[in-house]
Amino acid sequence: MRRLSVVLACAIGVLGVLGACGSGSEKSSSGSVKSSSGPGELTLNATDNAFQPTQLGAQAGQKITVVLKNDGATLHNFSIDAVGVNKDVEAGKKATVTFSPPSAGTLSFYCRYHQALGMTGTIAVS
């Protein structure tokens, strides 16, 4: 019986370690972190006054394509001042932006129409 308990405890530990491993860094829900799902591609949803996820990950010097899907009922925008990005997307539409972060650090993005309402986020560049 004791041997079975030890085996079960080891199996649970291994499953916990395997569950922590994944392809890319991704957390779901609001305030989540998401890295590229494809080579250099990130998907960002704009709803009324919020981005989802609010945190993205990328690599310095590599070309990144952000696909912005406007699931909201109004015009939204995706802006990153540090790399000269400023793209509008109408309600129910998609827009694509491509840029290369020059160095590691944090890039802040926002909707120029709803920034004051908290429609902001960051890209952690490693």
Image (spheres, rainbow, N blue to C red):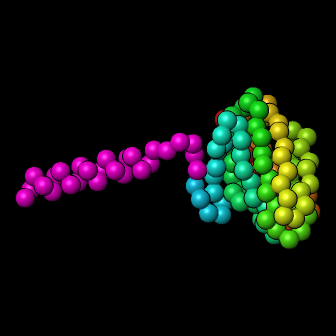
Residue at 86 percent across and 71 percent down: it is 73
Up-down relation of residue 27 to residue 106 (above or below)? below
Q: Position of residue 66 (x, y in %)?
A: 78, 45
Residue 17 picture location, percent across and down: 38, 47
The residue that appears at 82% across and 61% down in the rendered structure is 70
- Left/right placement of residue 64 relative to residue 84 reads left
Q: Quadrant of residue 4?
A: bottom left
Magenta run includes residue 23: yes
Q: Is residue 29 left or right of residue 101?
A: left
Give the tally of numbered discs.
0
Which residue is situated farthest in the front direction here?
93
**Which quadrant is the C terminus positioned in?**
top right
**Rendered residue at 64%/49% (across/down):** 34
Q: With 114 as the anchor, is 31 left or right in this view?
A: left
Residue 50 as seen in the image, left or right of residue 83: left
Residue drawn at x 71%, y 60% as measured from the top left: 52
Percent position of residue 22, x then y: 49, 44
User: Is 61 within the magenta?
Assistant: no
Q: Quadrant of the N terminus?
A: bottom left
Residue sitting at the far left: 1
Where is residue 7 drawn, in percent x and y?
Answer: 18, 51
Residue 105 visible in image: no
> Looking at the magenta stretch, what is its main secondary structure?
helix
Quick check: can you spot residue 67?
A: yes
Q: Which segment is the magenta one? A: 1-26
